[in-house]
Image (tube, rainbow, N blue to C red):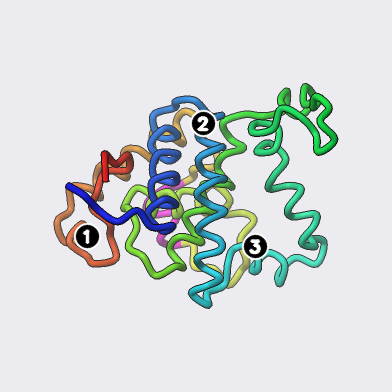
């Protein structure tokens, strides 16, 4: 089946493949590169749609961040993964940066990417929507007092107390439960396609 390959579809495919690898505990480097690539496109599409990007939310909420500092944090690993040389053509020395990378570094980038993607007005996968709740549940102690934690604690009780493997197991289990619910999967806001898509 053929379909038009738009920028939104490119972002969906990259973010979907990234999340699928993440859920299966596969290559975290590939997860990062795909999440950042798709996230960058989703960010711009959200801006075009007139929606607030997650970057804009952070800049408006946290005075310690400016655009340059935030860009450095977001691109820290991505630049190390995608560039062999500096702008001057010299070999990059990324040993120290690479030594601090782990699967957990991908949580933020998957969250940022899917947040902006959702704000483009597109439907998005149930896996990504459950992931967003899981992301907040892991950080419940850092959320504003104005945030209602009821939904987080019902779906993912005491998540922050579990080790990483159990946290991700809880995420996969919740996704499977929601994927079986026809009332949810039939909602127009849900993209029912698998995370990893075939030819277009």
Q: Write the residue at 54% across / 46% down.
A: 37
Rendered position, 27 above or below 144: above
Choose between 200 and 15: the one closer to the eye.
200
Q: Could you say which quadrant of the image residue 123 lies in?
A: bottom left
Residue 152: say if magenta: yes
Choose between 113 and 102: the one closer to the eye.
113
Span shown in magenta: 150-157
Choose between 86 and 99: the one closer to the eye.
86
Choose between 44 and 63: the one closer to the eye.
44
Mark 2, mark 3: which one is toward the viewer?
A: 2
Which dot marks residue 184?
A: 1
The residue furthest front is 89
The percent position of residue 141, horizontal first and vertical second, equals 62, 54
Q: How crowded is mark 2: few (under 14 residues within 10 Å), some or many (20 or more)?
A: some
Which residue, given by chain and number where applicable, does mark 2 sit on?
30
Res 186 visible: yes
| 83 lies left or right of 63 | left
Q: Could you say which quadrant of the image residue 169 lies in?
A: top left
Counting residues from the start of the chain, the first of labels 2 and 3 encountered is: 2
* CA–CA distance in space, label 2 to label 3: 23 Å
């Amino acid at each position: 089946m053929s379909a038009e390959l738009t920028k939104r579809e490119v972002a969906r495919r990259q973010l979907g493949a990234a999340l699928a690898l993440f859920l299966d505990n596969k290559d975290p480097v590939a997860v990062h590169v795909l999440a950042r690539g798709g996230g960058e496109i989703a960010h711009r599409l959200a801006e075009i749609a007139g929606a607030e990007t997650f970057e804009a939310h952070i800049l408006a909420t946290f005075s310690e961040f400016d655009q340059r500092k935030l860009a450095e944090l977001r691109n820290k690993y991505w630049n190390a993964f995608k560039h062999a040389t500096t702008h001057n053509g010299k070999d990059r020395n990324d040993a120290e940066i690479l030594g601090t990378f782990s699967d957990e570094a991908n949580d933020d980038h998957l969250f940022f990417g899917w947040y902006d993607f959702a704000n483009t007005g597109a439907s998005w996968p149930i896996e990504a929507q459950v992931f967003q709740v899981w992301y907040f549940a892991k950080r419940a102690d850092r959320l504003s007092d104005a945030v209602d934690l009821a939904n987080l604690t019902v779906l993912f009780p005491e998540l922050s107390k579990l080790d990483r493997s159990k946290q991700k197991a809880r995420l996969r289990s919740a996704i499977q439960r929601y994927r079986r619910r026809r009332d949810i999967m039939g909602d127009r806001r849900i993209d029912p396609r698998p995370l990893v898509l075939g030819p277009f």
